[in-house]
Image (cartoon, grey):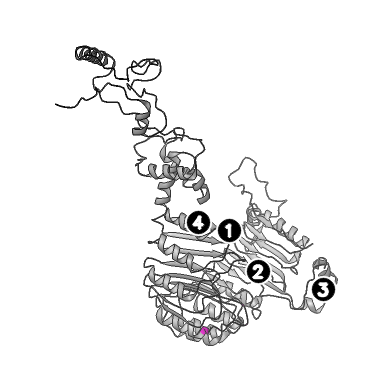
Amino acid sequence: MQSHQPHPATPVSDAAFLIKRGKKRGSYNCGRCGLPKKGHSCPFGAEGDDVSTPVSKPPAESSAVASIGSASARMVTPVSVARPVPPPRRRRALSFDDVTVAESVDELAEEEEELFEMDDCPGLDGSGGLPASCLWEVLRRLPPAGMLSAARVCRGWRETTRRLWRAAEELRLRVPAKAQIGFVGSVLQKCPGLLKLSLKIESDVDATMLACIAFSCPNLQFLEILTSDSCINRISGDDLSRFISDKKCLTSLKMEGCSNLGGFVFSSTSLSSLWLSDLHSLSKMVFNCPSLKEISLDFSRLETDTTDLTAVMDGLGRSCPKLQNIHIASVLLSHDSILALSAANLRGLRMLSLVLGSGITDASVAAIVSSFTKLELLDLSGSSISDSGLGMICNVFPETLSKLLLALCPNITSSGIQFAATQLPRLELMDCGMTICDPNCEKSTDEEDDDSVLQKTPNSKMHLIYQKLIIKHNGLKKLSLWGCSGLDALYLNCPNLYELNLNSCRNLHPERLLLQCTNLKSVYASDCGNMLIKKIETQVDSDYSAVESNYPLKRLPDGSKRVRVPYFCSPQPCDDDEKGRPAKRHCAVIASGEFV
């Protein structure tokens, strides 16, 4: 015979049910019959009833009781006599309950398993009905710290930020001084598809950072590491060489504070742009980068630098035939290094910047113009070239050169600058800062205005060395004459000029200044006299071309010459004719540090 089986509707004790189910959050349904608790009186669990306790009775009575119990059970319970399973716990859209870190991590892991399709939902949980596309556009404009904070608002925002991290292709991150390497790693792991990364590091950095970047960003194409003045970059040349060779997709690398490289051997077929600054005493520099098009090497200004720039130039010319832009800043630049560079077959060179090389002379310029005939930008700031070398530049690049920078070149005079302005019609930018200098004029901090000194001693030796500069150019857009203390007269007729730098032009006389630049937008006049600043403000607010257009032309009685009719004889312009009225120009004169 089969053993006696309890009826499915037979109630179970609370202790047995808790042992089987485990103590969890309470349910809104009855634990005995499964019906809702509200307004419910369970027939199996009323206090005082002995229904759960078996009583020995005769077989007839027990069967009768069993049949009655079965009938009553069919009336109260649903069709399925199995115990109903409590519904799963639902999450609230916004939860402000205090939870521990472990619980929040578990909930985040559970929620990441569920897929959230933005296109299927017009609004997100907790977003107040905001469309998914709008929320996406709002959150994508937040900085990384704001993204991390937004992820804690609600489930919808957390899911959107998670998708934003995964879809991010460019990231700019500031690493505070107290942050650990784990902070950078946790952020980078959220962006598996990252292509461009820019880090502003305020603490010491070593090869661990490169290893973290290499592991977290397998498809990285652009890397920029900026360092603060107080931190130290301890990355060695071997570490950087290994990183470049391993990153097959890397095309651009920019790094500051490279004083501890020592030496390197870069081998990459994808690298096209390389910027390194603060280099010092490199024992070897080997570039096996056939795709390299742009290179910038900024060396330290210390006298203890022992880098062999001649070997560097020779190696660049031989191993990087596609170079188009070269920038090298070093006090060790000499005529020999220029000869080594000009010997290379770099026919595609478009930009050449050799800064702070006092050993660069007119002979070096001759080597440059003979080897590179298609230059668009030439920067020889800090060199020893003279007006003769500037003349060679004008003769070779009249149709290509658009940017010429000759700051800190004491051998160049105003005559050479005027000649360059007339011979280079495509010129758009010219920097002649600290070129026309007055070596005898030393300005102390407590000295008064220099304009009064010039008026008192107009025939002194100091006045004899002053120069005047006259520039008339239709295409020039930016002109910098900062620090030209040897300039006392300036006449500019440049209709397309919109930026002029006259900082520290202390000896420029207000009565010898004429600015006929109709599109001028910014004039920098810091450390200049008050009279000069007022003169600049007066001239930039006036419009010479508009005034002259109101004067009609008239021929002489003999018909030989056309002259301007004086203003008092000319008819006054009608106020109703608004079309001919010129618009008022807006030019900012920036003189925050003017000399008083």
Name the residue: 52% across, 38% down: 98
Mark nearest the camera among 2 and 1 is 1
Q: Earlier in the sequence, mark 4 or mark 2?
A: 4
Above or below — where is 413 with respect to 87?
below
- Per the rendered image, the range of residues in magenta is 300-309
Q: CA distance from mark 4 to mark 3?
A: 66 Å
Q: Report the side of 61 relative to 310 (left or right).
A: left
Tell me where residue 146 appears, x and y as whole percent.
52, 47
Q: Is residue 468 above or below residue 341?
A: above
Compared across the picture, whether 413 is left or right of 18 comes to right
Residue 533 in the image, given as x and y percentages of width and height? 74, 60
Q: Could you say where residue 590 lies in the image, as x and y percent from the top left?
A: 68, 58
Q: Tell me, yes or no, whether the two marked residues, 4 and 2, touch with CB atoms within 8 Å.
A: no
Query: Which residue lies under the disc numbered 2?
Result: 481
| Magenta stretch: helix, strand or loop mostly | loop
- The residues tagged by marks 1 and 4 sit, at their Cα atoms, a distance apart of 10 Å
Say which amino acid is labelled 4: Phe
Dividing the picture into quarters, in which one does residue 497 lie? bottom right
